[in-house]
Image: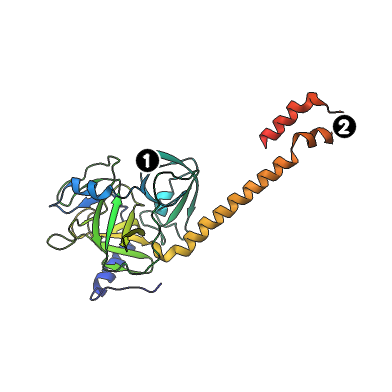
């Protein structure tokens, strides 16, 4: 995907890139402009049920019935058996797939801050949000959604309370790998201007197209200022650049699961009761219990 630049933003882009090389602070809670309220954030966040929580700390988004997407640096703490909270239900993690370029030095996000998490069962009652495969993010207003610390640009942040909040922001620049959004002070910015804050990276930046919502970015870090304050820049991994990796990873996992299931069935066929008894001369019905236990184990 070719790099997209806003008009007259070359200096802005260069500043972002240089700052990103120096520092990146995990973010993805929600901080709104000082003349709006927490009730505004909660109201906007209501519609995004597919944005979920990594327990105990982190955000993610349901993109398929049994798959969520999050940041690679969040996925480092996720293990098989960890929990993802979606609505009122908790789902166990089956496996974690981190992008091949998803590792980086301490204190900085990796080159591709992206990971997929497969759940042990399909999610019911919540519709997934598909990933965005377009390239028109520049200049568009996105929804930033998260569960972490919250507040406004003039207040101290309040620790996360497990509630989903959302704000909006306009994409200032979109490169091949990342999306950048600056926290503008009123009267500039969107009606519910905001950014992520400290607490739970991995949450989404959502784009609306033709009345449908898509995941355009995954929260990776912030720069050029103090998190949650005017002037800071939010950085999101640009999901559309990694559609092929996402699809291949999910499809490969489905193939592996099918292969495992077939192998399991083959073993069960080999270890049926009659085969076990017939294979050993002299075995009689008194050995059926032992044969049944072998079948159960397989």
* Position of residue 227 measured from the top left corner of the image (x, y, whole percent): 24, 53
User: Which quadrant: the C terminus?
Assistant: top right
Q: Give the left or right position of residue 231, taking residue 123 as reference.
A: left
Q: Give the left or right position of residue 77, taking residue 166 as reference.
A: right
Q: Which residue is mark 2?
A: 281
**Callout 1 environment at 10 Å: few (<14), some (14 to 19), or many (20+)?**
some
Q: Give 7 or 210, whichever is nearer the viewer.
A: 210
Label 1 and label 2: CA atoms lie apart by 57 Å
Give above or below for 139 relative to 185: below
The type of colouring in the image is rainbow
The residue depicted at 34 percent of the width and 47 percent of the height is 49
The residue depicted at 21 percent of the width and 45 percent of the height is 157
Report the label total: 2
Q: Give the left or right position of residue 127, taking residue 151 as reference.
A: right
**Callout 2 environment at 10 Å: few (<14), some (14 to 19), or many (20+)?**
few
Label 1: which secondary element: loop
Q: Give 202 or 26, whichever is nearer the viewer.
A: 202
User: Which quadrant: the N terminus?
Assistant: bottom left
The residue depicted at 54 percent of the width and 57 percent of the height is 251
Name the outermost residue toward the right: 281
Q: Which residue is mark 1?
A: 56
Label 2: which secondary element: loop
Label number found at residue 295: none
Q: Give the left or right position of residue 108, taking residue 119 as reference.
A: left
Of labels 1 and 2, the one closer to you = 2
């Amino acid at each position: 995907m070719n790099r997209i630049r806003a008009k007259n933003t070359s200096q802005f882009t260069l500043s972002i890139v240089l700052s990103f090389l120096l520092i990146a602070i995990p973010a993805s809670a929600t901080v709104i402009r000082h003349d709006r309220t927490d009730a505004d954030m909660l109201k906007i966040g209501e519609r995004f049920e597919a944005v979920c929580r990594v327990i105990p700390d982190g955000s993610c988004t349901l993109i398929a019935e049994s798959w969520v997407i999050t940041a690679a640096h969040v996925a480092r703490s996720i293990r098989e058996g960890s929990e993802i909270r979606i609505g009122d239900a908790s789902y166990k993690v089956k496996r974690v797939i981190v992008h091949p370029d998803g590792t980086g030095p301490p204190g900085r996000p990796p080159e591709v801050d992206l990971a997929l998490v497969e759940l042990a069962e399909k999610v019911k009652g919540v519709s997934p949000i598909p990933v965005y495969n377009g390239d028109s993010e520049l200049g568009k207003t996105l929804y930033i959604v998260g569960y972490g610390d919250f507040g406004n640009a003039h207040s101290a942040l309040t620790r996360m309370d497990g509630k989903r909040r959302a704000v909006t922001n306009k994409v200032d620049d979109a490169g091949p790998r990342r999306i950048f959004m600056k926290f503008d002070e009123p009267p500039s910015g969107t009606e519910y201007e905001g950014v992520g804050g400290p607490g739970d990276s991995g949450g989404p930046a959502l784009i609306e197209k033709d009345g449908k919502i898509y995941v355009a970015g995954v929260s990776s870090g912030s720069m050029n200022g103090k998190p949650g304050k005017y002037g800071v820049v939010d950085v999101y991994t640009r999901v559309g650049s990694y559609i092929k990796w996402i699809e291949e990873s999910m499809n490969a996992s489905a193939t592996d699961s099918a292969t495992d299931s077939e192998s399991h069935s083959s073993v069960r066929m080999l270890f049926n009761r009659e085969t076990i008894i017939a294979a050993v001369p002299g075995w009689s019905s008194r050995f059926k219990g032992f044969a049944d236990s072998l079948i159960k184990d397989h």
